[in-house]
Amino acid sequence: MRRGDVFHVHWPSFSYTGSSFLGTLFKSVTFLLLLLFFRWRGIKIVWTVHNVWPHKGGVSLFNRIMRTMLCSFSTSLIVMGDSAKQELIRNFKAKERQIYFIPHGHYKDAYPTSGLNVRERYGIPDNAYVFTFLGRIAPYKGVEQLLASFNELRDEQAHLLIAGKPSEEFNLDLFKKGIQSCNVHVSLNYVKDEEIADYIRCADCVVLPYQNITTSGTAILALSCTTPVVAPNIGLLSDYLTPETSVLYDPLEAGALTRSMREVRAKKSFFQNAEPYRLKLEELNWQRISKLTQEVYSR
């Protein structure tokens, strides 16, 4: 790489965290030396902050130090909402002048349907209301809470579909104990790219009960498929999920997830209006995002 080139970082924790203490020590020192070398060579460093804190490890002194160093070495920081900007300044001593807002792009037409009938695969009636969780199943994603809330609905016409591969940290035994209804359908495998749109379009609602998150590609994927979302009002989710497309709840309020699932179920026809989804996707246009990214690179 030469002076003026750009080194763009997306998920830095994978570059500085290993599977052991020695592995982490080696990777973190190597990562910092690489950043130092790039700055010495006049190479620009840009970090797109998908998550303020990494999913694995979360808030810790080590992550604070590494991310503070990354901010100090970075020429520019890209955030997808104002609250992330404030967190970078507060937690990692980032400078306001180096932070730029670029929204997360949509997934419209990124995942064409394959023609798979997901309801038929899982034996779900065509007239059933389907809540869907899609994606990697990890402890911070609140899937156990989703199961408990679905059980509280006591709605024989509602079905819950959970599809995704569990992470190593996920307590699978505890999860299985929470399945108390034959209306719960589970696939503990990666969803193939060519089937992702089929799973989303099978859903009447996508439920994402995250315990911590900055932004969510799955939420934006649901919007791209004109599917409403139930999610906690945390991170940047409220920047993307409007009252016309989603129901956001207070994760600290008892029973809030269950009530939100009941609300989106009761307002099914309201959330079928495609216009609010179209308007939001216009804001997340990739041509605009490309132009904004090029402007950051040129600074």
Image: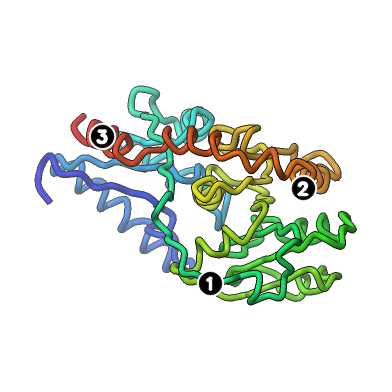
On screen, residue 264 above or below 56? above
Q: Amino acid at mark 2?
A: Arg
Query: The residue under label 3 is which amino acid type?
Result: Lys
Q: Which residue is mark 2?
A: 265
Which structural element holds mark 3?
A: helix
Of 248 and 5, nearer the camera is 248
- Answer with left or right where residue 297 lies relative to residue 157: left
Which residue is the site of mark 1? 116
Q: Amino acid at mark 1?
A: Leu
Please name whichever residue, 8 or 57, is drawn nearer the observer in this view of the structure. Answer: 8
Which numbered disc flags the more N-terminal residue, 1 or 2?
1
- For residue 241, which quarter of the picture? top right
Label 2 neighbour load within 10 Å: few <14, some 14-19, many 20+: some
Q: Is residue 61 visible?
A: no
Between label 3 and label 1, give the one nearer the viewer. Answer: 1
Give the residue at the far top of this rendering: 97
Sequence-first disc among 2 and 3: 2
Identify which residue is drawn at 45% across, 45% down: 50
Is residue 126 rendered to the left or right of residue 148? Answer: left
Under circle 2, the secondary element is helix
From the image, tell me which residue sits under label 3: 291
